[in-house]
């Protein structure tokens, strides 16, 4: 049986994402991920995966952690607002503003992250990242 770190590493290979997702979370849908707590071991592996050299792994880890109810996931995702890869930054901005992905979340962000999102909304070099940061801030204002 593969370790959680090995499963996270499988996100790097196209076609192995579903297998890894199912093994880490017990399911593959967003609804399932919101209803099923991630084990401590899987959470730790996903957080470590946010620092993986492969942007595919980082992106997939954000996707999974976006649905995690554990506040440590939000804190870990915050660092990816400065990722080199726009797609990863965009996913991080989404995760930090999306209450509907985490209905149990109280919306609390680490210190300085709302200001960082505001900076990204106007200054990120990628239009899609700017748009997602703007949208994340607008969703936060509605809570």
Image (spheres, rainbow, N blue to C red):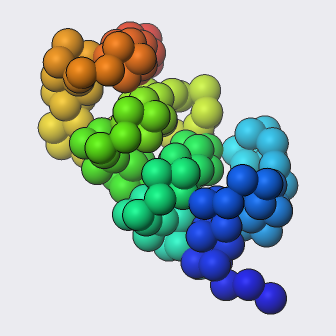
Q: Nearer the viewer, residue 16 or 108?
A: 16
Q: Nearer the viewer, residue 124 or 137?
A: 124
**Quadrant location of the C terminus?**
top left
Vertical side of 143 occupied by 71: above or below: below
Residue 21 seen anywhere in this rendered image of the structure? no
Dividing the picture into quadrants, the one containing residue 87 is top left
Q: Taking 83 as reference, is 2 left or right?
A: right
Q: Taking 1 as reference, is 3 left or right?
A: left
**Residue 58 position in % (x across, y down):** 48, 54
Residue furthest to the bottom in view is 1
Q: Residue at x 19, y 31 (%)?
A: 116
Q: Residue at x 39, y 49 (%)?
A: 77
**Residue 62 position in % (x across, y down):** 51, 48
Residue 45 seen anywhere in this rendered image of the structure? yes
**Quadrant location of the N terminus?**
bottom right
**Residue 82 position in % (x across, y down):** 25, 42
Dividing the picture into quadrants, the one containing residue 136 is top left
Q: Taking 1 as reference, is 52 left or right?
A: left
Vertical side of 81 occupied by 4: above or below: below
Q: Residue at x 53, y 64 (%)?
A: 46
**Residue 12 position in % (x across, y down):** 60, 60
Q: Taking 94 as reference, is 67 left or right?
A: right
Image mark count: 0
Q: Residue at x 37, y 40 (%)?
A: 85
Q: Nearer the viewer, residue 65 or 107?
A: 65
């Amino acid at each position: 049986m593969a370790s959680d770190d090995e499963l996270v590493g499988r996100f790097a290979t196209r076609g192995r994402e579903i297998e890894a997702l199912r093994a880490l979370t017990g399911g593959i849908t967003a609804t399932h991920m919101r209803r099923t707590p991630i084990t401590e071991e899987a959470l730790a592996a996903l957080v470590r995966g946010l620092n993986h050299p492969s942007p595919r792994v980082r992106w997939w880890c954000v996707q999974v952690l976006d649905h995690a109810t554990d506040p440590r996931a939000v804190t870990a995702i915050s660092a990816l607002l400065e990722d080199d890869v726009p797609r990863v930054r965009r996913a991080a901005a989404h995760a930090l503003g999306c209450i509907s992905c985490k209905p149990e979340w109280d919306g609390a962000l680490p210190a300085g992250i709302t200001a960082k999102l505001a900076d990204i909304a106007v200054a990120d070099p990628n239009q899609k990242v700017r748009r997602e940061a703007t949208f994340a801030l607008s969703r936060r204002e509605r809570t």
